[in-house]
Image (cartoon, rainbow, N blue to C red):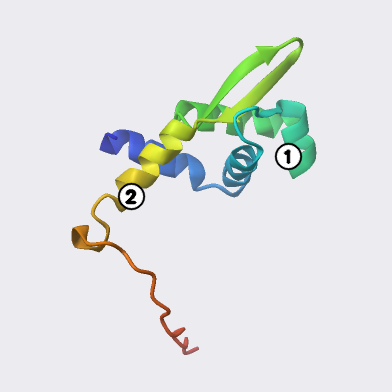
Amino acid sequence: MEIKSVVNALAALAQESRLAVFRLLVQTGPEGLSAGKISETLGIPPSSLSFHMKELAHAGLVSSRQESRYVIYSANFRTMNDLLGFLTENCCGGKPCVPTDLPEQEHSS
């Protein structure tokens, strides 16, 4: 995955509504959801949702298709997996990563 694509995807996800939409579409799976159902589920006004979907589509994170009079949006799982792969490509210096329980750090005020 090219750096410019990674930056675009991360920028698109770095907004609360778009992150919520993307997570909902990932949970829904390849069948996707209509714009109306996304709007209703997340409480995002249709005019705002349209803007957010455009940003996610521009970053390659979602795709849309027309079904009758509805626009159905789906997460682009290939882009998602490519992004995750890019972010973890050199994880743990190439050694298998083993989760460890780290003690929580206390925050001083």
Percent position of residue 40, x then y: 80, 37
From the viewer's perspective, tell me whether residue 53 is left or right of residue 104: right
Q: Residue at x 61, y 35 (%)?
A: 29
Circle 2 sits in a helix, a strand or a loop, which is it? helix
Q: Which residue is mark 1?
A: 44
What is the crowding at mark 1: few (fewer than 14 residues within 10 Å), some, or many (at least 20)? some
From the viewer's perspective, tell me whether residue 20 is left or right of residue 91: right
**Mark sitting on residue 87:** 2
**Outermost residue to the right:** 40
Above or below residue 7? Residue 64 is above
Q: Nearer the viewer, mark 1 or mark 2?
A: 2
Percent position of residue 38, x then y: 72, 35
Question: Tag 2 or tag 1, which sits nearer the N-term?
Answer: 1
**Outermost residue to the left:** 93
Above or below residue 49? Residue 106 is below
Q: Residue at x 47, y 86 (%)?
A: 107
